[in-house]
């Protein structure tokens, strides 16, 4: 899967093919605005990892946070 654009929305089923997501991708997945997602990440409400200045969300941590079993969006 390439970059998520406004024309292609990320779905829970797409998570199996990814290791990490950007805050923007998680915002789209959760139906949040970009600013709200960054605020939630800053407050520790969304599980993040920092790599330099980049903020990434590990898919396994996001799936656990959402209560989704790994290896399938259902």
Image (tube, helix red, strand yellow):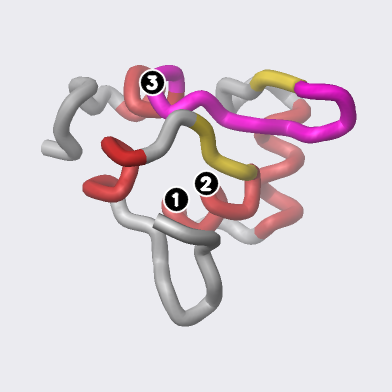
Mark 2 vs mark 3, foreground winner is 3
Q: Which corner quadrant of the image does residue 19 belong to?
A: top left
Q: Nearer the viewer, residue 10 or 33?
A: 10
Mark 1 vs mark 3, foreground winner is 3
Which residue shows up at 62% across the image and 43% down it?
A: 22
Label 2: element kind? helix
View extreme (front): residue: 2
* Label located before the other in sequence (2 or 3): 2
Q: Are dots 2 and 1 in contact, CB under 8 Å?
A: yes
Marks 2 and 3 sit apart, C-alpha to C-alpha, by 13 Å
Label 1: element kind? helix
Which residue shows up at 54% across the image and 52% down it?
A: 25
Crowding near the residue tagged with mark 3, few <14, some 14–19, many ≥20 C-alpha atoms within 10 Å:
some
Mark linked to residue 50: none
Q: Which residues are magenta?
A: 51-61
Q: Which corner quadrant of the image does residue 17 belong to?
A: top left
View extreme (left): residue: 74
Q: Position of residue 64 (x, y in %)?
A: 34, 18
Left or right of residue 22, residue 71 in this image:
left
Crowding near the residue tagged with mark 1, few <14, some 14–19, many ≥20 C-alpha atoms within 10 Å:
some
Q: Nearer the viewer, residue 42 or 4?
A: 4
Q: Nearer the viewer, residue 55 or 17?
A: 17
Exactly how many numbered labels are in the figure?
A: 3
Query: The C terminus appears in which quarter of the rendering?
Result: top left
Mark linked to residue 26: 2
Q: Which residue is mark 3?
A: 60
Instruction: Relative to 13, say whether 52 is above or below.
Output: above
Mark 2 vs mark 1, foreground winner is 2
Which residue shows up at 73% across the image and 32% down it?
A: 55
Marks 2 and 1 sit apart, C-alpha to C-alpha, by 6 Å
Marks 1 and 3 sit apart, C-alpha to C-alpha, by 16 Å
């Amino acid at each position: 899967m390439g970059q998520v654009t406004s024309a292609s929305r990320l779905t829970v089923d797409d998570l199996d093919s990814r290791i990490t997501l950007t805050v923007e991708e998680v915002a789209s997945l959760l139906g949040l605005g970009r600013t709200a997602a960054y605020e939630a990440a800053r407050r520790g409400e969304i599980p993040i990892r920092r790599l330099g200045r980049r903020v990434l969300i590990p898919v396994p941590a996001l799936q656990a946070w959402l209560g989704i079993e790994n290896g399938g969006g259902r």
